[in-house]
Image (cartoon, rainbow, N blue to C red):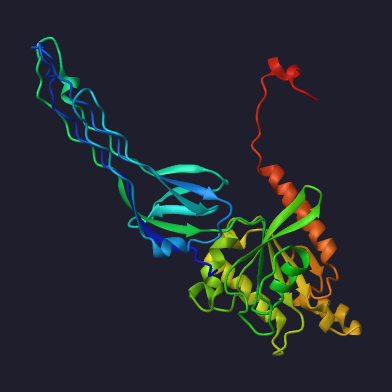
Amino acid sequence: MKFVDEAFIDVSAGDGGNGCVSFRHEKYKEFGGPNGGDGGRGGHVFAVADSNLNTLVDFRFSRRHDARRGEHGMGSDMFGAAGTDITLKMPVGTIISDAETGEVLYELLTPGEVITIAKGGDGGFGNMRFKSAINRAPRQKTPGWPGEKKNLKLELKVLADVGLLGMPNAGKSTLITAISNARPRIADYPFTTLHPNLGVVRVGPEQSFVVADLPGLIEGASEGAGLGHLFLRHLQRTRLLLHIVDLAPFDGADPVKQAKAIVAELKKYDVDLYNKPRWLVLNKLDMVPDDERATRVKDFVKGFKHKGPVFEISALTRQGCEPLVKAIYKHVKSVQVAEQPHIEVDPRFAGDREP
């Protein structure tokens, strides 16, 4: 399925039903009194985070979503039925914002999370509501309130712990295939990856993390060149970036120059993204003669002036992948622990906690 990470929709909650003016008419009941019921509430529009979805493509073909209005009130003290609610299923990681102002309204970050994106209007009052000691036969009623109508922009940012960054054909797809259950398209030409691929990396029992393979970046990506700029937003929620570098480019390009270009594009696009932890992964060592590997790695690190961790791997033969995976899991786990909120415990109840 084609990956679509942006869509525009129009949602309309249902209007409330109108109240009713009615009086009780029965034989031998001269003063039956008012019995007009209230109108029903209009239907709400909900959004639910569905972990089985990974694209917004469905909303490209169905832009309008309207909930039903509430039924009008009727006589004999009968209230109108509420309008039917509608629920829109969206991928986890969807950001819902106002299409006109750009203001972010909601974020779906947890599977199964449900939010109300448009509230239905309340029903109007029937004349039985206006009965009082001095107004025995009220003829007042109120119309139903209109439901909310919104023009929304949906934007999907994939939720991954680790993001793969690099030039086209650097070996990102081969790496995610080697360490995870993902099976992206792999070929010997640039821009093979056309949309993000997510893979779950199993380190051990109940030990795993999610890695995202994005289309390769080229110089000028922050201004719109190539495909990678369309998906840089997906790296903003990752806890770690792996900068994959091809040490043996088939076109004879300078790996140091290419790597510096990628870092420059990151900084132009988003400074916070540039400041994320970024590890250097030197790939395709199997393409470098054994007697040249140490020298080529040393020259690259010296020319690139990278200060973080450096890993030497061959994604094709899986050489060096296991130490890389274990180091990633250790880092991701430490960040997850640090992100957990600290809860203060009242000293009076400290002894009641289980060990």
76 up-or-down from 182: above or below: above
Tell me the quarter of the image containing the N terminus: bottom right
Above/below status of 133 relative to 268:
above
Residue 288 location (% of width, % of height): 84, 83
Which x, y percent locates residue 118?
Answer: 36, 44
Placement of 133 over or under 204, stated as above or below: above
The residue at 69%/14% (across/down) is 348
- Residue 313 location, x and y as percent? 82, 71
Q: Nearer the viewer, residue 328 or 38?
A: 38
Image quarter hosting the C terminus:
top right
The number of numbered badges drawn on the structure is: 0
Residue closer to the observer: 278 or 85: 85
As drawn, the residue found furthest toward the front would be 27
Question: Which residue occupies 84% across, 80% down?
Answer: 286
Q: Residue furthest right?
A: 291
The answer to whether 247 is drawn above or below residue 243 in the figure is below
Residue 108 is at least partly visible in this image: no
- Most foreground residue, 47 or 160: 47
Q: Quadrant of residue 200?
A: bottom right
Image-based side of 321 in relation to 174, left or right = right
- Please identify the quarter of the rendering in which residue 299 is found: bottom right
Task: Give the left or right position of residue 134, taking residue 269 as reference.
Answer: left
**Residue 68 appears in the picture as rendered:** yes
Q: Residue furthest bottom?
A: 251
Measuring 54% from the left and 58% from the top, which residue is drawn there? 157
Q: Position of residue 6 (x, y in %)?
A: 46, 63
